[in-house]
Amino acid sequence: MENDPSRRRESISLTPVAQGLENMGAEFLESLEEGQLPRSNSEMRGSRSEAGPNTFSRWRKLQPALRARSFCREHTQLFRWIGTGLLCTGFAGFLLVACLLDFQRALALFVLTCVVLVFLGHHLLKRLLGPKLRRFLKPQGHPRLRLWFKRALALAAFLGVVLWLSLDTSRRPEQLVSFAGICVFILLLFACSKHHCAVSWRAVSWGLGLQFVLGLLVIRTEPGFIAFQWLGEQIRIFLSYTEAGSSFVFGEALVKDVFAFQVLPIIIFFSCVISVLYHVGLMQWVILKIAWLMQVTMGTTATETLSVAGNIFVSQTEAPLLIRPYLADMTLSEVHVVMTGGYATIAGSLLGAYISFGVRAEVLTTFALCGFANFSSIGIMLGGLTSMVPQRKSDFSQIVLRALFTGACVSLVNACMAGVLYVPRGAEVNCMSLLNTTLGSSSFEVYQCCRDAFQSINPEFSPEALENCCRFYNHTVCAR
């Protein structure tokens, strides 16, 4: 009997529910939720007296906790709103006190709060009135009529830019050199393209147009210039916080004298802040907003647009991480755009390290616009992409050199755009009086005046002025 296989199978088989036995585990959990003591069949047969009063007292003690948990589950949304309200109230009080004590120090926090409130208001308006606004703003009429209307707007914008350039460059004809540089680089890139018919001139025109508008806002308008100057100062203050930590770890002597202890902590600090912002989802939200604007105007795909927008904040190896799940299926054209965006931009952490050196803004801007695409970047780009998608290593190797060349040309186009829009600010410097004084250090005004002095054929500059210039710059005049 003991060796009977049928009985052995019977002993280990599960009893079906149809025989009248229910899931005891489910009964136990249900009784816990209801705050009652679960009862089994054996207890019903007479084992109730064996449990004793201790079991009932134990369940009575658990009942308040179970009821509290059930209450919290039923009112989760209410508790969430209460917590959010308390946090907002505390933040509003903190902001009010900070503005009353020192508004200049609290200006950055005040601006960030206003930006957040604007986006929250836009989100609320979109949820409440989104469909109505879309129906109201949707253009009416025949599709062909809308097409001609778009073409008329594009032609008007083009003629406006041409008229503005002709009037603006009449006072400074040297700006036409930069405009010619833009045309030459675009024609060069078009000539080197493998598929001339596939070039999206909408993306090219919108890209140059957005860059022109942004440059016009920053360089030519006083509010835009002040706003970006203030933003740069806030970034400098933010990055200067690393000095306290670096001095505490390495000592002030090493931080002041050794280059590595100045740069590496800034890069690590900035990268950690970006990682925290990624973790909370703020950086993804900002990048998606920028990518949405580029995608709507230029008509590019979502993946390449997202990567290019991420290059504003992160490096060429970190930006592709935003689109890592799609790299295996992207076309060569899209991968080429991703590589070009990495070659044509500079990582925010590296720019922060340069800002911390205290170099003049003119020098830093010139250096940034000259491009960072070099042959050593090829290995960095290939190493980063092939580690994410090893099976596409051959595809990446085919286009990496073309992307390097394109990235270098894009950087030079940016420099030419800045050259078209740049106008010296402030009053004209009197070079004669400036160079005849004792100069303790060089500046951009000193450089301009010394350049004019070295190139001048008239003896209008005194020997003392030339001697002051020779203290800072080398020229053939100084050897006489």
Image: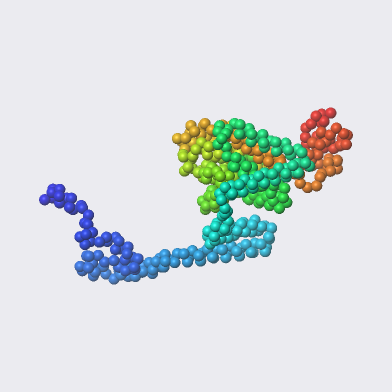
Q: Quadrant of residue 262?
A: top right
Q: Is residue 314 visible?
A: no
**Which residue is at 81% across, 45% downward?**
428
Q: Is residue 97 visible?
A: yes
Nearest the viewer among 468 and 290 is 290
Q: Position of residue 407 (x, y in %)?
A: 60, 36
**Which residue is at 23% across, 61% downward?**
21
**Which residue is at 62% across, 59% downward?**
114
Where, quadrant-wise, is the C terminus in this rendering? top right
Q: Position of residue 193 (x, y in %)?
A: 58, 33
Is 360 displayed left or right of 33 in the figure?
right
**Which residue is at 68% across, 39% downward?**
416
Q: Position of residue 208 (x, y in %)?
A: 64, 42
Q: Quadrant of residue 379?
A: top right
Q: Quadrant of residue 140?
A: bottom right
Is 326 displayed left or right of 352 in the figure?
left
